[in-house]
Amino acid sequence: MSQNTFYKLHWVKGLVLLGIVLFVVSCRQNESRTSDPWKQMAQIVDSITLPVFKGDTLSILDFGAVADGVYDNTDAFKKVMGACSEAGGGIVLVPKGKFLTGPIHLEDNVNLHLEAGSEILFSKNLDDYYPLVHTSYEGTELMNFSPLIYAYEKKNIAITGKGVLNGQAGNDFWWPWCGKDSYGWQEGDPKQHSSLKKLKEEMSEVDVPVNQRIFGKGEFLRPSFIEPFSCENVLVQGVKIINAPFWVIHPIKSINVTIDGVVVESHGPNNDGCDPEYSKNVLIKNAVFNTGDDCIAIKSGRNEDGRRVGIVSENIIVQNCRMIDGHGGVVMGSEISAGVRNIFVEDCIMDSPNLDRAIRIKTNTKRGGFVEDVYVRNIKVGEVKEAVLKINLFYGIYGAQEGDFIPRIQNINLENITVEDGGEYGVLAKGYKEVPIKDITLKNVTIKKVDSAYSVENVTNLNFINTIINGKLMKTLSD
C-alpha cells in the first residue's frame, strides 16, 4: 500500500467517525427536546440551592436604629450588616415598627428578616442613593443610583419575613420621571427620555465601558427596588413590597434564585413584579403580583448591550402564583437580545379586567434574541383584555425599533388552560417571512368569550390538540 493510499484511508475513516459522533450528538439533542419537559423542570428545581444561615441574630435596635419612621437608620443598617457578615453570617432582625433608611446593601451569608408588623421606609432624598453603583436600566448596564436593596457579587443572601418594604415612590417622587402626567409629571418637568437617549445612543451603541456610563443626579433613571447583581444562592421570601420606583425584584447575572410567597402591590410606571435577567435557575413560587406593568418579565439585555454580555436567561420556573393587574402575566421581553430558554409556568391564576395578556413574548429586529422551549400548564385565566397568548415581534415603544436581528421564536406550549373571558384573541402572533415563528401548541385548552380564535402571520405549525375556543373544536394549522 502506498503512503498516499494509507493517508486517504485514514482520512475517510476520520470522516466516518466524525459523522457518527455528529449523528449521536444530534440524536441526544432531539431526545432532550422531545423528552418530558416537566421532568426536566423537576430536576432544575431540585438543583436550586437555597441559602443556609447561622442561627445567630443581630437586631438593628442594638446598632442604634430608631423605629419612628423619621430617624435616618442608614448607618445602623450598614453597621449591623457588616457585623453580621464579619461574624460568619446569620440573621439581621428588623422588629416591629417603622424604620426609615437609605439603600440597604446585603452582605455574604446574611438574612435580612422583617418581623411581622415591621416596615422599612426608603428615603426620598436623592443624595442617600450615592455612591453610584454598577446596575442596569431597561437592559442596559450603567453606573446609577443604588437600588433600594442591593447586593453585588454576594453569596448566600436572603430577605425574609412578614414585614413591608415601602419604596415610598409616588407621583411626588421617582414616578414623575417617566414623563407621564398620570404619574405626576407636568409640562417643563425633567423626564427620563433624554437620559435614555444618552445611555443608548452615546454610550451603549458605541461600547463605552460601563464604569464610564455615569448617571445619578442630573439624570432621570429610576433604580430597581431589590437587585441581586452577580449573586449566588438568593432567597426573597414572605415580604410585601409596595411603592417601587421601577422594576421591583431584579435578579441580574445571578444563579440559584428563589422568590417565594412575596406580595407585590405597586402600580407605578415600569413596575414589573419580577425581572430575572441574564440569570439561571430561578424559581418564582407562591407569589402575588398586582403591578403597573408586567407581573413577571424575563429579560436578557437590550440590543447591543445584551449581545455584548451574551448571557442567556434560562431555567426560569413560575409555580402557584397569582397575577392580578399587569400588562402581562408571564412575559419574555422585550429586552431579550441574549436569548431566553427553558421557561416553565404551572398552577397559576391570572385574572383581572386590568390584565392585558396571560402569556406574552415581545421583541423586535433591533432587540433580536430568541425564545425557545416555553411550557405552560394548569393555568386558570379569569379575564384578560387582549390575548391569552401574544407573540409580538414588532414591539416598539420609543419610536421605530428596526434593525438587522430577526428574532427566533420556537416551541411554545400551553396545556390544560381554562379561560373564562379571553378578550380579543385566543392566539395573536405575527412573525417574519424570513424566520417564521415555529411550533405553537395548545393542548387541552378551553377559551370562552373571545372575539377571534386567532390571528397569526408567518407562523409555522399552530397545533390545536383537544382545544375548544368559543365552543368550537379547533383544527391544527400547518404551513
Image (cartoon, rainbow, N blue to C red):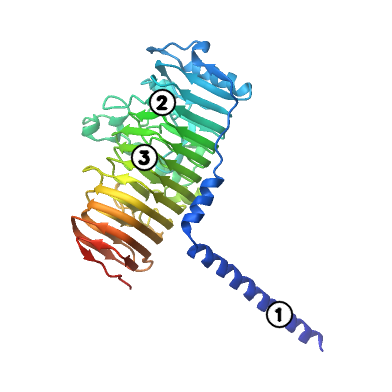
Q: Sequence order check: which comes first, mark 2 or mark 1?
A: 1
Q: Is residue 106 above or below residue 15?
A: above
Left or right, 9 with respect to 321, comes to right
Q: Is residue 239 above or below residue 411?
A: above
Q: Amino acid at mark 1?
A: Lys
Q: CA distance from mark 2 to mark 1?
A: 66 Å
**Circle 2 Cα neighbour tier, 10 Å, few/some/many (<14 / 14–19 / ≥20):** some
Residue found at the far bottom of this picture:
1
Residue 230, x across and y down, in percent: 54, 39
Q: Sequence order check: which comes first, mark 3 or mark 1?
A: 1
Q: Nearer the viewer, mark 2 or mark 3?
A: 2
Q: Is residue 20 above or below residue 453?
A: below
Q: Sequence order check: which comes first, mark 2 or mark 3?
A: 2
**Circle 1 Cα neighbour tier, 10 Å, few/some/many (<14 / 14–19 / ≥20):** few
For the residues bearing labels 3 and 1, Cβ distance under 8 angstroms? no
Q: Nearer the viewer, mark 2 or mark 1?
A: 2
Q: Residue at x 28, y 30 (%)?
A: 176
* Disc assigned to residue 162: 2
Q: Secondary structure at mark 1?
A: helix
For the residues bearing labels 2 and 3, Cβ distance under 8 angstroms? no
Quadrant (top left, top right, bottom left, bottom right) of the C terminus: bottom left
Left or right, 202 with respect to 383, comes to right
Q: Amino acid at mark 3?
A: Leu
Q: Secondary structure at mark 2?
A: loop
Residue 450, x across and y down, in percent: 19, 56
Q: Nearer the viewer, residue 267 or 310?
A: 267
Q: Nearer the viewer, residue 377 or 191?
A: 377
> What residue would you read off at disc 1?
13
> What residue would you read off at disc 3?
196
Left or right, 13 with respect to 473, comes to right
